[in-house]
Image (tube, helix red, strand yellow):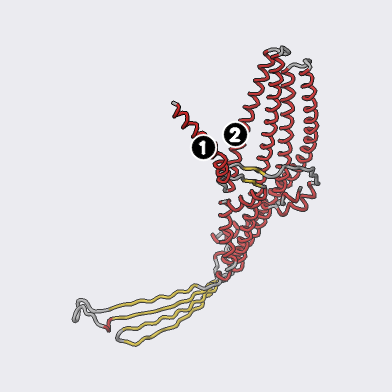
Amino acid sequence: MIRRMFLSGAVWGVLLFLYPWVRGVAEEVSPVLILSLDQAVEKAVAHSLSLQKSAIDLRAAHYAASHLWSELFPSLSASAGLSYGTPLFTGQGFQLEKSGLGYSVSAGLNLSLQGGLPSAMKIIALAYQSELLNYDHAQRQLEIHITKTFYTLLTDKHRLAFLKESLDLAEKQREKSKIAFEYGLIGELSYLQSQLSVETAKLDLSKAQAAYDTALRDFLLVLGYEQTGKTVLEGALVIQPWQTDPETLIYQYLAQRPDILSMRQQIERLRFEETRSILDARAPSLSLSVQWRGNGSGSSDFSDTLSGSVNLSIPLDPWIPGTKKSQSITATGAALEKAWLDLKNTEHTAMSQVRSLTANLRNSWESLEIARLRVEIAERTYTLTEQGFQQGTVEFLTLEDTRSKWTESRQQLADGELAYALMILDLAAALNLDWRSME
């Protein structure tokens, strides 16, 4: 037994001796990740799979727009062949002779010119502009989404601080109640209620901490981090009153909204489509063809021929009302008219959104001023109530109620500030502006 106790003590001694070294190694393995908002946005943009797919579409559209000459490039063809001929049932039958071997080579060029070719080139160039707009819009929306999540996590982190402070106050009050109960200054019910307040505060803090850890872990996965150690979000949510006439914003920035720009590009594309449809259907088309062919065999010399043709085709049926080609031209014009109506509807919706957000910002700031005053009153009320409880003039339930209201008022203020910041981001997205320029 003595020997076993000695070995156990030796093991504990070794563990205590190695503890600082093991702790240092653990800290090196799992370093603290300090993450700022700019770093988070940069990582999200680099790690976003949807943005990478959009970049692929953009590169493909850019390649097509930079090779418009391919629309005029003629079709080229080349071929070569071998042949062999010999009697099978007549004469001497099947024979392998050099004179029966033949060969041929040919090359051709075909160029077709249609009236809608310039419009087709403009459509390809416009497609690149549309993909560029889509990519920029997707990147800005991702940046705003990451910023919203970052600020939400910062607010949740501050909420944890409020709950931790509330727990500390509850524990201090429990210790005071314990001493007062031992001296007979308060009853057992008040002491039990102080213990219950501590356990309730622990439960609230535990739930909030678990929700924060889950949200932070999901956020890091979006950024591409596989972080298992501690993560510290660097920064603070600072808001300032932002008031601007909505009509001024509409006049200055409405036209640069991505959805409106996309609708205008759609209208421009439909115009080119209509022009191309009309010219391809009704304008004459010119076709140029050149072909060279060479032949030879084992018993004859090589010979070649060069041929060419020019064809001019004039369509007639598209000029007749009611034909299929005439109806397709009419359908293109109808699509253009509907696109104009969609643009008007999009502009009206956008103007309504900007007016609503600016009004909500103004009302929200007024509510925040009231919330700040409410926090000051709640804090002062708790201080006076705690003094009254220590003097025996206030019951514990009243003290607990004032403490809860103080914690609730601070949380509501933090939520209101977060909502105000998110509305700023929504307005920046609605105007297609950099949200940093609106601070």
Q: Position of residue 363 (x, y in %)?
A: 78, 37
Choose between 73 and 390: the one closer to the eye: 390
In this rendering, would 302 be left or right of 246? Answer: left
Residue 304: % across, % down: 40, 84
Q: Quadrant of residue 336?
A: bottom right
At a point 73% along the width and 25% down the height, the residue shown is: 403
Q: Identify residue type, mark 1.
A: Val
Q: Which numbered disc flags the more N-terminal residue, 1 or 2?
A: 1
The N terminus lies in quadrant: top left
Task: Report how far apart the C-alphas of labels 1 and 2 lie in the structure.
Answer: 35 Å
Q: In this view, does 378 lie above or below 221?
A: above
Outermost residue to the left:
92
> Does the residue at mark 1 contact the one at mark 2 (Cβ under 8 Å)?
no
Disc 2 residue crowd, few under 14, some 14–19, many 20+, Cα 10 Å: few
Instruction: Tell which of 10 and 150 is nearer to you.
Output: 10
Q: Residue 14's mark?
A: 1
Q: Can residue 278 be seen in this view?
A: no
Number of marks in the image? 2
**Residue type (three-letter) at the residue carrying disc 2:** Ala
Residue 168 on image: x %, y % = 69, 28
Helix, strand or loop under label 1? helix
Quarter location, residue 24: top right
Residue 290 at least partly seen:
yes
Mark in the foreground, 1 or 2 = 1
**Residue closest to the eye, 141 or 83:** 141
Q: In this view, does 89 lie to the left or right of 63?
A: left
Tag 2, which secondary structure?
A: helix
Residue 75 image label: none
Question: For mark 2, what is the residue?
Answer: 210
Residue extending furthest toward the front:
2
> How would you rate the neighbour count of disc 1 (Cα within 10 Å): few for under 14, some for 14-19, many for 20 or more?
few
x and y percentages locating residue 273 in the rendered image:
60, 61
